[in-house]
Image (spheres, grey):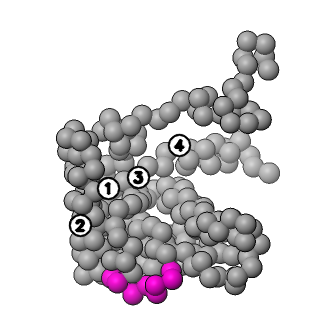
Amino acid sequence: MFSQPEIEAVYKAIYTRRDVRTFLPDAIPEDIVHRILTAAHHAPSVGFMQPWNFIIVSSDEVKEKLAWAADKERQALAIHYEEEKQTKFLGLKVQGLKEAPITICVTCDPTRGGSHVLGRNSIPETDALSTACAIQNMWLAATAEGLALGWVSFYKKNDVRDILNIPPHIDPIALLSIGYTENYPVKPILESANWEKRRELEALIFEDGWGNKKDSSNGN
């Protein structure tokens, strides 16, 4: 189905992808933005509900308001960390919201598809999980296009609803700033800042039940 170079390209996008915080003001061609959104729209969704919408923010005035909402929450969250981690947390910048040429708010509509969506009846949060798949597609597509993407993960949802006129029942899942950058990280930013290290994969794999580790002594 895929040639070896195509397989390698997929894995390259996965391993290269980073959460980026600094952007150049250069505009992104509309056809590239459309390709990225098309990739998002081809994500899997439980019951084929396709619960996502995409609000493209390019107005400096609106971006300033979103940056205010993120910075307000960043300051509020800092009190939950001890001194060293608090300093590192406050060092996380939100100016990417203002620097990037566009920020895309990805939303989730829990009512899409009606009250009996296949799969969601048993696990209600599958609508948000489906939206997360769309976000991952966007991220990988942006990486392949030579763009940087930053996920702003701290804000009060009602602040974002008010700023972007989002209806009360719609969930603003993510603010994604997208643009070109001169500072594409080799490692995840939080790993470079010694916030956390990537865990060993082998320690996270169980077989046939929680906690069951593969016995490597006999090859099983």
Range drawn in magenta: 162-170
> For the view shown, which residue lies furthest in the top direction?
217
Magenta segment main secondary structure? loop
Query: Label 4 sits on what residue type?
Result: Tyr
The residue pinned by badge 3 equals 19
For the point 46% across and 74% down, the residue is 172
On screen, 184 above or below 111? above
Q: Earlier in the sequence, mark 2 or mark 4?
A: 4
Given residues 32 and 107, the one toward you in this image is 107
* Residue at x 58%, y 67% (from the top left corner): 128
Q: Nearer the viewer, residue 153 or 8?
A: 153
What is the x, y in percent for residue 102?
37, 72
For disc 1, the marked residue is: 21
Identify residue for label 4. Answer: 15
**Answer yes or no: do the residues labelled 4 and 1 have beta carbons within 8 Å?**
no
Q: Nearer the viewer, residue 157 or 211?
A: 211
